[in-house]
Image (cartoon, rainbow, N blue to C red):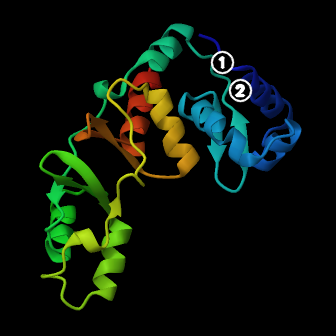
């Protein structure tokens, strides 16, 4: 599988104009920065472009192995998902904060029986802790983001699709849901580690 025509145009522009900022690349294609965000993410994670904060994008000089790229495109979420930390809606804000730090995770998935009904992030818990005077009694149901306002993926979605959702929506992780049951989690950290492990010896 080859890179998309737009991704090839991005590489061509960066080669000619490095360091090139995201805004410059977007203007060259007559697109918005948001439109090409996923493309830039893929090109940097695969090592074709090198992103330097406050400087811009550089062409790394690396050529992408088509076989590895195809394998990566076909890889499914269930191959890399991790185990989520689950709590119930009755869990108190205090207990949720303790669980979050003991498990060293960025979010807690709220379930009823086995069905995913909500998510609580570090930011949610911080806001809840600052606003609540009785953290040991107040349940996280009062501060969680509820379904259907939660972006999810399925175990058979590709990791490329998951990565695009993370980048486009600027979130850190996605619940993996099968028949409304929370069975896993895919995060930016896990995807970054996968790309590092895959391409470090190429």
Q: Of 162 and 8, which appears nearest the observer? A: 162
Residue 85 placement (x, y as % from top left): 19, 51
Using the image as rendered, state which of residue 113 and residue 198 is in the foreground: 113
Eyeballing the image, is 146 above or below 27? below
The residue under the point 23% across, 70% down is 140
Image coordinates for residue 57, horizontal then vertical, percent:
71, 41
* Residue 154 as seen in the image, left or right of residue 164: left
Which corner quadrant holds the N terminus?
Answer: top right
Residue drawn at (53%, 52%), measured in percent from left and top?
170
* Picture coordinates of residue 145, whole percent (x, y): 36, 62
Q: Mark 2: give few (<14), some (14-19) or many (20+) Cα within 10 Å.
A: some
Q: Is residue 92 left or right of residue 154?
A: left
Helix, strand or loop for disc 1: loop
Q: Which residue is mark 1?
A: 3
Name the spot of residue 33 as percent of width and height, x first.
Answer: 74, 47
Q: Secondary structure at mark 2?
A: helix
Q: How dense is the environment of label 1, judged by Cα within 10 Å: few (below 14), some, or many (20 and up)?
A: some
Image quarter of residue 54 = bottom right
CB contact under 8 Å: marks 1 and 2: yes
Residue under label 2, please give it: 7
Q: Residue at x 43, y 38 (%)?
A: 192
Does any portion of residue 104 appear in the rendered image? yes
């Amino acid at each position: 599988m080859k890179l998309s025509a737009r991704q090839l145009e991005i590489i061509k522009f960066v080669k000619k104009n490095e360091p090139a900022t995201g805004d410059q690349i977007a203007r060259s294609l007559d697109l918005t920065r948001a439109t090409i965000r996923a493309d830039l993410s893929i090109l940097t994670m695969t090592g074709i472009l090198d992103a330097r904060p406050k400087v811009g994008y550089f062409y790394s000089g690396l050529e992408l192995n088509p076989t590895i790229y195809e394998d990566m495109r076909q890889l499914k979420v269930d191959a890399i998902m991790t185990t989520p930390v689950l709590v119930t809606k009755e869990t108190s804000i205090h207990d949720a904060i303790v669980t979050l730090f003991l498990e060293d995770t960025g979010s807690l998935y709220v379930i009823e029986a086995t069905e995913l009904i909500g998510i609580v992030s570090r930011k949610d818990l911080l806001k809840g802790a600052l606003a609540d005077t009785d953290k040991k009694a107040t349940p996280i149901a009062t501060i969680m983001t509820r379904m259907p306002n939660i972006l999810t993926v399925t175990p058979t979605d590709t990791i490329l699709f998951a990565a695009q959702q993370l980048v486009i929506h600027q979130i850190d992780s996605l619940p993996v849901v099968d028949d409304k049951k929370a069975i896993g989690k895919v995060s930016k950290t896990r995807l970054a580690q996968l790309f590092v492990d895959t391409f470090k010896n190429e």
